[in-house]
Amino acid sequence: MGGPLREWWVRTVRQANPRWQGASTQGYYVLDGDGTGIVWDNFPPRLAQFLDMGVQLYRQREHGPPLTLAAGQSSATAPRTPPPGASVLKLYTRIRPLPADAGEHNALMGRDFMWVLQEEVREMLARSGSGSAAFPLPNSLVGRLTVFHLVDNTRGQVWAYQTGALQSASLTGRVLRNSGSTRTLALQGSYAKRDSHPPQWTDLGQEGTLEGECDLDTATGRLTRFRVHADSRAWTDAVYDPRRPPRGRYPIQTAILEATDALSRQIPPEPSHTGMHYLRPHIPLFG
């Protein structure tokens, strides 16, 4: 909630959600064109009813003049954009099969975007140019994927892992074929991470394997296709979230594929606000 629009946003949040106590402002909001907060909710299954109620409340109120922003405020608060030449991936996460005693929030689907830097693609092209032997993928790419994106976000925003939590991480590529300017790589790997953050939790972890393939354009240095599936097991003793994860170790399935639509380039990855920590994470395992 920082930046030049903080004062307006805090006021708007309090208008839409009078019970707000100053913590996270996550959720859905209906705002008037004059900047007034009308109503708030944070329960996705109620979204249709929430929007109907928002429209009804909007029609019942008197509307002030349209909200205007001072010069530079809009650009200063705009979401981060992908670095030049970066490719965008989409991630879809589900707990599957869902344990019988898991609460309803665990049946939801987690979504996020991931950035792959152009220099990482060029590094993969260079490492794969000598033949069909397996080679390690760039450390920053492996770190970004395993630390920030292979997570259980099925119940919404997550408390991010730190790079020091990574216990092992290996993701390799191998040339499957070359067709014109397209080089197809087979990808596979594994990872494990574990964290402790008392009093919120004393044991949080996830470990799994990945398998799939991707296409790289040797002429432009771009990633054009990405199809990877991650099969993992997660666990947590977290007590801060009332929407409890399943007990014990539970299965997580993650599908990762390329994003080519314009909207995907306008929605930054959830952890990208950490800046260089996200783009070039320092993983102790990698030196």
Image (cartoon, grey):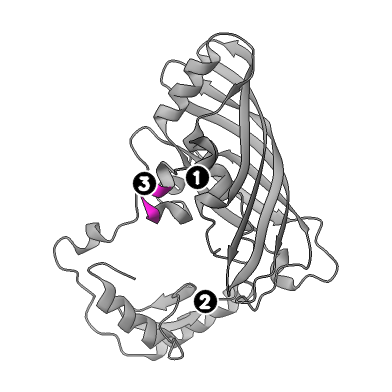
Q: Position of residue 285 (x, y in %)?
A: 54, 39
Image point (62%, 75%), residue name? 241
Q: Position of residue 91 (x, y in %)?
A: 59, 47
Label 1: state its secondary structure. Answer: strand
Q: Position of residue 6 (x, y in %)?
A: 28, 74
Q: How many numbered marks are there?
A: 3
Q: CA distance from mark 3 to mark 1?
A: 14 Å
Which sits in the foreground, 284 or 100? 284
Horizontal side of 72 relative to 248 (left or right) equals left
The mark nearer the N terminus, 1 or 2, is 2
State the residue position of label 3.
276
Which residues fall within the magenta stretch?
273-277
In the displayed orientation, state which residue is furthest to the right.
100
**Disc 2 to disc 3: CB gap under 8 Å:** no
State the residue position of label 2.
51
Which numbered mark, 2 or 3, is in the foreground of this view? 3
Label 2: state its secondary structure. Answer: helix
Q: Is residue 258 above or below residue 132?
A: below
The label number, if any, that marks residue 114 in the structure image: 1
Three-letter code for the amino acid on which mark 3 is drawn:
Met
